[in-house]
Image: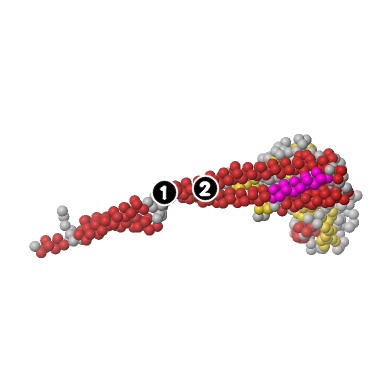
Amino acid sequence: MSLSVNFNSTSVRTHRNLVTADRALGVSLDRLSSGLRIQRASDDPSSLVLANQLRYHISGLDRAAANAEEGVTMLQTADGAMDEINGLLNRMRALALSAANESTQDGFSLQALQDEMDSAVASVTRIAGSTRFGSLSLLDGTLGGNQLSPEGRDYLQDVDYESSLTPGGILPGSRLSVILDPAGLTVTRDRVGMALTIGGLPADRDAPLLSTDQYSALPLPRTLAISGPGGSYSIPIDTTTTISDLVAQVDAVRTTYGVQAGYDADSGMLTVESQRFGASGLTVEDITGLGGPGILDDDDTVPGNTLVVPAANQTVDLTYTDVGGTLRTLTLTQDPTQDGGRTFTNLLGGPESAPPYTAFAPGAFRVTLKDDTGGERGVDIAVPWSTEYYANRVSSVAIQSGDLASDRIPVDIPDMRAAALGRTANLTGVGLSSLESLANAKVLITGQASDALRVIDAAITEVTSVRGRVGAIQSNAIEATLSTLRTGLENLASAESQLRDTDFAQESAEFARNQVIYQAATAMLAQANQIPQRIVDLLRG
């Protein structure tokens, strides 16, 4: 063995072993003091990845379990309200039975029975309308919505109906199909326009309006009077008013008056139009005051004038099946006052021409078109013909019952208001379309107690059936899922603990081993550092 003053290889190797032993001892101390085997990615990279995935699942399942608990509370709230409705229906049934016993009733007693019947009907609607879980209404039918077909989503924003205005009801699962003319559907706005020129060429935006060929001879002063959906207003025009100024002044009040303007410098076309689709009643007075060709001139006796082109209110047909199995077809007309003229609704009830209607009342159905025009002027909404525009009622509310997006339990409670109950009795022909009609028709006074019993019995069956479905969702779906979630949480937490937590028995033994090695390495380093002393001994000898 060679001896060297400049390099003590034995000391270096011993020091390296001491550093390794110190690091191992530090790891053991960290694990024993924190209780965690994995504190950083370098401790066990693959186990860290798996443990973190388990942690995410545990967090998700814990939140899902809380969601399920809230779902149970929500359904119990709905069930409690429906139990109250059942109690009212039982009382109404007793009232109808009392009224049916004609031998012991007189006009005063029948009026008292009818008054109580009216109060009970109103209470049913009040309970159904006011039962909420937070801000979520539970019994007024809003837990379900109409889902559009894939083709319908491209052109339709919504297809909906008001259950209180459909006495004949909608058969569960029935499609609400939108039927278009084979030529398709195009909805337009009231609009007017005129090409402005100077020397036969399109006028510049910054050119004074009165300098254009059409108005160069007009006397002053001038005003442009416009009437739109929001009212009428006038714009003063003088020799300094440019085309851009006129457009800006119209657009400055577009929200108030519902009128917008634009100018295309390439074609020289100045356009003023209603912001609403459909016949919204746009009018623009003749700026010339002379009856000659002029901007936005509504004098159709002068050749060459550009007139206001009124938009026609279009129609579509809608088909559905009522609860009695009858296919219904009705016509919906474009309403310029709703959603900017994109909504169609039925103006008439049916199938009768006058109330009381047995299938649907005016305003019961709505079809709203999508507006992809972005408010651009001169652009219409066009819907091509198709047989696949329809909507089906589905639940619009669901309980997130797991940590995946697909882990959802839908909840759909139909309308429990008086106008929506009792329809399955199929007594619309005698004017008793729902529970609400028992109050409207004063059935106990008019001698219709037997028919009233049939409507009430139908309502009891409907409410009881819904309560059964709600109970099934709670017990078979939510509570069963909740039990599974709790078991999953326990197992996943155990699996994460095995990966991430310290095994104290094993780590204690490892700590003792590392401690002995550390102490030995420290002692040996002291010995290794003495080796160069032998060189001194040799020199002395």
Residue sitting farthest toward the front = 104
Q: Is residue 201 visible?
A: no
Mark-to-mark CA distance, 1 and 2: 19 Å
State whether residue 521 is above or below residue 486.
below
Along the line of sight, the residue nearer the viewer: 473 or 402: 473
Q: SS of the residue at dot 2?
A: helix
Circle 1 packing at 10 Å, graded few (<14), some (14-19), many (20+), is some
Residue at 84% over, 54% down? 283
**What's the amino acid at mark 2?**
Arg
Residue for badge 2 = 486
Query: Where residue 441 sits in the image (x, y, percent)?
Result: 85, 46
Magenta residue span = 81-99
Numbered tag placed on residue 498 in the rendering: 1
Residue sitting farthest toward the left = 541
Residue at 75% over, 46% down? 90
Query: Where residue 174 sits in the image (x, y, percent)?
Result: 72, 38
Asked if residue 354 lies left or right of residue 153, the reply is right
Query: Where residue 110 sits in the image (x, y, percent)?
Result: 85, 48
Asked if residue 245 lies left or right of residue 481, the reply is right
